[in-house]
């Protein structure tokens, strides 16, 4: 151990690096390598003597760092030799790998030395020199000083004349002098004003620059990184200088502005903070000091108001010029003043750095030889994203360095191309807004819009009702429908061996005609036997066609909506098929919804005929036809039966021919692909629900081309789980009946936990769509359901633990994403344990775009709004042309005349073309599988006479409302919940009501949810 000359405290910058070293010991995160390829006459031994001279002349180069009682001290050795390693006869092909490996060797900070040199004599007669220092004792400026000293000493030792120095560095000042001087300034308060300047400059600045990541941010960030080169044309610096000159700025300022514009486009933030390193050597006595003097500035970029690039350059210049007198404020002190809290998951205050080195003097001048820089960037990340720029003889060279635990190399490669494209556009048209410049290079544009949307698949010419009839003719005796609770058995064939005969099914062709006052005639569904009801394909089609004939005779046909206010079960399925076979459009109406909501939906859709299980009090002009016998035969109406009545004493001959009252002329036309097949109502932001009208062509694509991707075949047993008002019920029914499979309609009692498991097991279900909450409620291990080969998930975000539990080699777990407006499914993904949960790729004949607010496709990895196009796009909202025009817009990237649906969902593509869902852009949320517009809850609640204003939000998997009372004592919470329960579905009634004096708002004045 070399004798100690003296010890002294570390500087604030060194203290920060030592803390980081403790968090990530044994890494090369702060190694500073510099490599050269030397051709010509070169003597490694003489070069070693030059290194000895440099180490002897600079105390920082013989310094180590040791901890005493928890505090670090710098320990300067009285004397030391340079750490030089010479290897001879090295294969030239191995040179770069050796350089990289040596540069990545970690330093022992306590033992030293913290500067080392490797010289490789290659078998082709050339040499490679690698200088590696730890950042604790060296910065970029120090490297230039060291190279100049090595060059001068080498000339002296080889007897070569020394060139005239352009800027001789003052001698005599050592790093300990600087450290003591800086400590004195801190202790005396001389830097308090500088720190206060930065604290004011950064007041209310965002604490995190939220770049969209490929992986969740880990609890403790690592140093693993990756490097992606940028391709900047040779004239880039000249173009930067030309634009900068218009605002009296520098190329550095212009390139920083371009990087800020890029970050704003990537993150969506208009206020961001970027780290910028500076030399920290404004004092002339520090020009010749080797050591860590570099400081970091937290520069705030303001892109509010959509400035032009010239204006943004001007803003950057103004901020940097104002900061010039205060750049010696220690970064550590600024962090402590602005963001004293610490999170191990990310760096405080700044997570992105822009490093620009405009000095070309990183040269090694060896007489008799030429030394050319070898680019050597380590895969160790200091920030989430670093843009490193250096000026060289051929122009600017630049790289993105990223954290590998946040971003994939593929994403950052796309970002690099996006930045190159953006920079070119900004420099070409600096007077235009920065948001107008293109961000997507042409090759990526073709990839995203064309290649990833090649989904063409054939569909038959026949429509869905005809295809269902085809299956019935092909396999008339096959089971089509099983409805009601399954009979519990423990045998392997449970679910069919004990099924009751088909005659036990509730018959939707059993009808009772009533007028508008039908609500007073009590008529519950007839009691069922203990087992499930079963229909074969022959029976299903026979019942559907008999009801369809009566519907057509009553005026139902193309374009005519028919309401179905029926409980889940065989009646609902047969009635829906009957309406389709009649050519009409069926409209599910949940009997559990408040009467006022049902009346609105019936009026909004223009429904004049409703098939119902219970009497309904509707406006004049709407006919209610009951599908089951009244319990009270004297209720003032008579049953209309198309087969033998359930009551054996009823006069069948008398009632068999009684018709449904006509609602219009008899329509003989058959449905066309462009006719509406069904209308589903979803939550609306204006406080009223909206009906999505889906055409037959979209339903056909779902039933054939999309079904093939799951796939559902004639051998499957499909669980129909969701409410018929939820669009997945459509796919359950048409997937099954068009394939010739079995549809098992779950009872209300079979929707969670043990009962759901028993139904899946006893009916030997092979395909099921379940909301994640239902799937997670299953109490069984995956192998307890060996028949279940496909589990489709949707309606809510899918938790990773669901995938880990249920995805096996024998079972697919499919994330099925899509709004009602795109016919159930728009994208699908096979989910794999250990990989991110994604929503995948577009379905057959569908297209998916991720667009910015100008409807431009965004690059890979960037967040935008998901737009969906293709065969599944609905006609629009029934009788809502204004809302339809707002949400269904022209598709500029598809065939002429095509439309795309604006989902309001945020998403991003990864480098492989896989789409991820990232939340909502508005207040629409998914709650236990139901789409809920928070604005609707708020609007209805605000109509209460004792409520001034309300805000709704999700808290986990429950809904909460925050209420500001109109005046005086707030109303009881139960009263508000009852008010909502009378006007909204049960799932939209909040679990919690919280009273506030006022709603919290953010800086923009919007409610802070």
Image (spheres, rainbow, N blue to C red):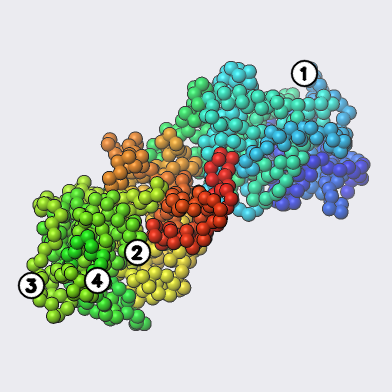
If you read the primary sequence from the N terminus, does the residue marked by circle 4 or circle 1 appear first?
A: 1
If you read the primary sequence from the N terminus, does the residue marked by circle 1 or circle 2 appear first?
A: 1
Q: Residue at x 54, y 45 (%)?
A: 1007
Would you name the residue on which mark 3 appears? 654
Element at label 4: loop
Percent position of residue 255, x then y: 59, 27
Element at label 1: loop
Which label lies toward us, 4 or 2?
Answer: 4
Mark pair 1, 2: CA separation: 87 Å
Would you name the residue on which mark 1 appears? 166
Mark pair 4, 1: CA separation: 103 Å
Would you name the residue on which mark 2 appears? 592
Crowding around mark 1 (Cα neighbors within 10 Å: few <14, some 14 to 19, many 20+) is few
Answer yes or no: do the residues labelled 3 and 1 have beta carbons within 8 Å? no
Mark pair 4, 2: CA separation: 16 Å
When asked about the image quadrant of residue 853, the answer is top left
Answer yes or no: do the residues labelled 1 and 2 have beta carbons within 8 Å? no
Q: Residue at x 61, y 36 (%)?
A: 272
């Amino acid at each position: 151990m070399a004798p100690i000359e003296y010890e002294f405290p570390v500087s604030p910058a060194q203290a920060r690096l030592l803390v980081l070293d403790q968090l990530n010991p044994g890494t090369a995160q702060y190694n500073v390598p510099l490599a050269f390829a030397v051709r010509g006459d070169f003597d490694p031994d003489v070069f070693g003597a030059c290194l000895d001279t440099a180490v002897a002349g600079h105390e920082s180069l013989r310094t180590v760092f040791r901890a005493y009682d928890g505090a670090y001290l710098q320990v300067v050795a009285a004397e030391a030799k340079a750490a030089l390693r010479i290897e001879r006869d090295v294969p030239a092909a191995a040179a770069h790998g050796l350089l990289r490996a040596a540069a990545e060797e970690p330093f022992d900070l306590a033992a030293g030395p913290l500067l080392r040199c490797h010289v490789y004599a290659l078998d082709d007669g050339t040499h490679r020199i690698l200088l590696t220092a730890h950042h604790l004792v060296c910065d970029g400026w120090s490297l230039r000083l060291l190279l100049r000293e090595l060059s001068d000493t080498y000339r002296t030792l080889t007897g070569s004349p020394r060139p005239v120095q352009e800027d001789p560095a003052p001698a005599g000042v050592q790093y300990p002098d600087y450290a003591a001087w800086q400590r004195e300034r801190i202790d005396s308060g001389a830097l308090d004003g500088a720190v206060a300047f930065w604290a004011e400059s950064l007041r209310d600045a965002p604490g995190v620059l939220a770049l969209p990541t490929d992986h969740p941010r880990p609890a403790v960030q690592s140093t693993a990184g990756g490097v992606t080169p940028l391709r900047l044309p040779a004239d880039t610096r000249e173009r930067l200088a030309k634009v900068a000159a218009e605002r009296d700025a520098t190329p550095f300022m212009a390139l920083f502005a371009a990087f800020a514009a890029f970050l704003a486009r990537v993150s969506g933030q208009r206020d961001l903070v970027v780290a910028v390193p500076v030399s920290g050597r404004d004092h002339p006595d520090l020009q010749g000091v080797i050591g860590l003097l570099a400081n970091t500035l937290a520069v705030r970029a303001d892109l509010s108001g959509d400035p032009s690039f010239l204006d943004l350059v001007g803003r950057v210049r103004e901020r940097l010029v104002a900061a010039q007198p205060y750049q010696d404020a220690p970064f550590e002190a600024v962090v402590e003043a602005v963001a004293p809290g610490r999170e191990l998951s990310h760096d405080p205050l700044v997570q992105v750095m822009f490093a620009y080195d405009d000095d070309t003097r990183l040269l090694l001048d060896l007489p008799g030889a030429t030394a050319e820089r070898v680019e050597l960037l380590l895969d160790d990340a200091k920030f989430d994203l670093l843009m490193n720029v250096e000026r060289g003889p051929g122009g600017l060279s630049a790289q993105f360095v990223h954290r590998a635990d946040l971003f994939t190399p593929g994403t950052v490669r796309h970002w690099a191309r996006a930045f190159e494209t953006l920079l070119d556009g900004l420099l070409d048209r600096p007077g235009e807004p920065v948001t107008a410049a293109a961000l997507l290079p042409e090759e990526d544009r073709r990839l995203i819009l064309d290649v990833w949307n090649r989904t063409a698949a054939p569909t038959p010419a026949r429509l869905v009702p005809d295809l269902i009839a085809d299956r019935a003719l092909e396999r008339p005796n096959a089971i089509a429908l099983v409805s009601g609770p399954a009979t519990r058995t423990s045998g392997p064939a449970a679910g069919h061996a004990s099924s009751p005969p088909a005659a036990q099914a509730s018959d939707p062709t059993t009808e009772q005609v009533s007028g508008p006052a039908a609500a007073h005639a009590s008529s519950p569904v007839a009691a069922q036997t203990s087992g499930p009801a079963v229909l074969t394909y022959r029976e299903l089609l026979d019942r559907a066609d008999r009801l369809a004939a009566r519907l057509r005779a009553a005026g139902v046909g193309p374009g005519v909506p028919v309401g179905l206010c029926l409980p889940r079960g065989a009646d609902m399925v047969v009635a829906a098929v009957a309406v389709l076979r009649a050519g009409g459009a069926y409209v599910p109406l949940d009997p559990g919804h408040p009467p006022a909501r049902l009346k609105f939906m019936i009026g909004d859709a223009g429904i004049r005929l409703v098939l119902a299980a219970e009497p309904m009090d509707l406006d004049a002009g709407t006919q209610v036809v009951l599908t089951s016998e009244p319990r009270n035969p004297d209720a003032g109406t008579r049953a209309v039966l198309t087969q033998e009545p359930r009551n054996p004493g009823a006069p069948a001959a008398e009632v068999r021919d009684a018709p449904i009252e006509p609602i219009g002329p008899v329509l003989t036309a058959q449905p066309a692909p462009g006719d509406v097949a069904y209308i589903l109502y979803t939550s609306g932001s204006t406080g009223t629900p909206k009906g999505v009208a889906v055409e037959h062509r979209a339903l056909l694509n779902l039933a054939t081309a999309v079904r093939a991707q799951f796939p559902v075949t004639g051998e499957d047993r499909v669980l129909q789980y969701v409410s018929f008002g939820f669009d997945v019920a459509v796919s359950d029914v048409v997937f099954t009946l068009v394939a010739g499979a079995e549809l098992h309609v779950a009872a209300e009692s079979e929707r969670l936990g043990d009962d759901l498991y028993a139904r899946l097991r006893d009916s030997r279900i092979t395909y099921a769509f379940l909301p994640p909450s239902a799937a997670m409620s299953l109490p069984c291990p995956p192998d307890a359901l060996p028949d279940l080969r496909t589990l489709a998930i949707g309606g809510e975000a899918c938790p990773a633990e669901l995938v880990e539990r249920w995805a096996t080699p024998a079972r697919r777990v499919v994330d099925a994403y899509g709004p009602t407006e795109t016919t159930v499914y728009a994208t699908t993904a096979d989910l794999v344990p250990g990989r991110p949960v994604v929503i995948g790729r577009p379905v057959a004949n569908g297209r998916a775009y991720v667009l910015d607010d100008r409807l431009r496709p965004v690059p890979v990895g960037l967040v935008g709004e998901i737009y969906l196009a293709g065969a599944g796009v609905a006609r629009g909202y029934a009788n809502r042309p204004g809302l339809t025009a707002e949400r269904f817009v022209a598709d500029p990237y598809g065939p002429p005349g095509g439309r795309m649906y604006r989902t309001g969902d945020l998403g991003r593509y990864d480098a492989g073309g896989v789409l991820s869902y990232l939340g909502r852009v508005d207040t629409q949320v998914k709650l236990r599988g139901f789409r809920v517009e928070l604005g609707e809850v708020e609007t209805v609640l605000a109509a209460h006479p004792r409520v001034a204003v309300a805000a709704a939000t999700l808290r986990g998997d429950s809904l909460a409302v925050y209420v500001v009372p109109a005046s005086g004592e707030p109303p009881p919470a139960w009263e508000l919940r009852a008010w909502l329960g009378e006007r909204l579905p049960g799932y939209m009634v909040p679990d919690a009501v919280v009273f506030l004096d006022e709603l919290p708002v953010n800086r923009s004045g919007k409610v802070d949810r």
